Amino acid sequence: MLSKRIQVLSPSLTLAITALARDLKAQGRDILSFSAGEPDFDIPQRVKDAAIEAIQNGFSKYTAVAGTPEVLKAIAGKLKRENNLDYKPSQIVVNVGAKHSLFNIFQAILNEGDEVIIPSPYWVTYPEIVKYSGGTPVFIETDEATGFKITPAQLKSAITPKTKVLLFNTPSNPTGAVYSKVELEGLAEVLKGTNVLVVSDEMYEKILFDHLKFTSVASISEDMFNRTITVNGLSKSVSMTGWRFGYLACPIKEIVDAIVDLQGQSTSNINSITQKAAIPALNGLVDDDIENMRAAFERRRNMAYDLLNNIKGISVMKPEGAFYLYVNTKAVENDSMKFCAKLLEEKGVAVVPGLGFGSDGYFRLSFATDDTTIQDGIGRIKAFVENYK
């Protein structure tokens, strides 16, 4: 009855764990969840005000599929001001969250058997969207020795005549790895002379620590700009997860036109109120709110990192961005599904198994929660690991 296409999909492990933790909590269990990739902060007041104004003014009709002229102009301005990227509004499409951006991109550009290079560990959705779109994921393995980053030599070895795309993510979910400008230049050199497109997921660009500066992949060179589709949104930086505001920017007209056609036959425009609400954030009017959130995440990172590294038998690399810790449990248990299931059952702590991100022997812990929960949760993890059987 079902299509072959839909049967290749696996459910999102992060969403499944989050839902399970929520259900157990509703049943009266004492559950602490570190599974969701969602900031715990409220949205900035300026965003609320813009949305309320839009509602009061009756801004509730269909808009252009790609987005209103006002929001497209704001995105183009943001990309120029903050990322040194010169996109025209006509090269930008607003989507129902960045996940939708990625779905549209791969539906538009992949043919059966096209290879997509994905650094591992990866966000759980990447290979699923590629497979659904007819592509073949090709993984480049990384670990703590390389800071969870791929090298130019690895990239060169992974490219074949079937390679269509390098799917890139910095800062990384789940590891928090951030590529420097020099590291990106090394990868860009490998891609010169090839026909490989780059899809760059930059959702966590504003959640950086230790005074690091973000470098957008497409800003490295003219060659990289011409081959890169930049993906971003407001879910993480502005805590607008439920508003579903993502966007893509691409200099290749054929791709943009195809994505607009696809979206026009599926969702059409994203909701009108969200587009109005996004404009203050894109125009830099909530930067102080973003910085307050970022600073809180950095403080929480330091606390959680220190607490976890004091647990004998597990270790974690200090992330440079995003709001996750990717914890190595191989000395205690290499089966991440088993480890995480037992942790949830015995201690009421929900984390996401590394298997979902392509690397067993790890789990991902989100520190997008309050100090007390972090301290209590890691205390439970410590007791669990010390008595693990």
Image: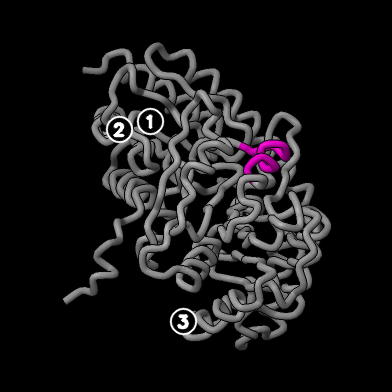
> Residue 336: which numbered mark, if any?
2
Q: Is residue 328 visible?
A: yes
Please tell me which residue lies in front, 134 or 164. 164
Q: How many marks?
A: 3
Q: Quadrant of the N terminus?
A: bottom left
In primary-sequence order, the first of circles 2 and 3 is 3
Residue 52 falls in image quadrant: bottom right
Query: Label 2 amino acid?
Result: Ser
Q: Which mark is residue 384?
A: none
- Tell me which numbered mark, 2 or 1, is placed earlier along the sequence: 2
Q: Measured from the top left, where is residue 283 in percent x and y?
A: 80, 62
Find numbered disc 2 in the image and state the secondary structure of the residue it sits on.
Answer: helix
Magenta stretch, overall SS: helix
Query: Relative to 306, is 183 above or below?
Result: below
Question: Does any portion of residue 121 appear in the rendered image?
Answer: no
Q: Which residue is mark 3?
A: 266
Q: Earlier in the sequence, mark 3 or mark 1?
A: 3
Marks 2/3: CA–CA distance: 37 Å
Q: Is 18 within the magenta?
A: no
Would you say 133 lies left or right of 76 here? Answer: left
Amino acid at circle 1? Tyr
Q: Is residue 181 magenta?
A: yes
Q: Residue at x 40, y 42 (%)?
A: 357
Name the amino acid type tagged 3.
Ser
SS for dot 3: loop
Do tag 2 and tag 1 residues touch (Cβ < 8 Å)?
yes
In the rendered image, residue 46, in percent from the top left (x then y), is placed at 75, 61
* Residues in magenta, as a range: 178-187
Q: Is residue 315 above or below residue 134?
A: above
Marks 3/1: CA–CA distance: 37 Å
Residue 92 spot, x, y in % from top left: 68, 72
Q: What label sits on residue 362 in the rendered view? A: 1
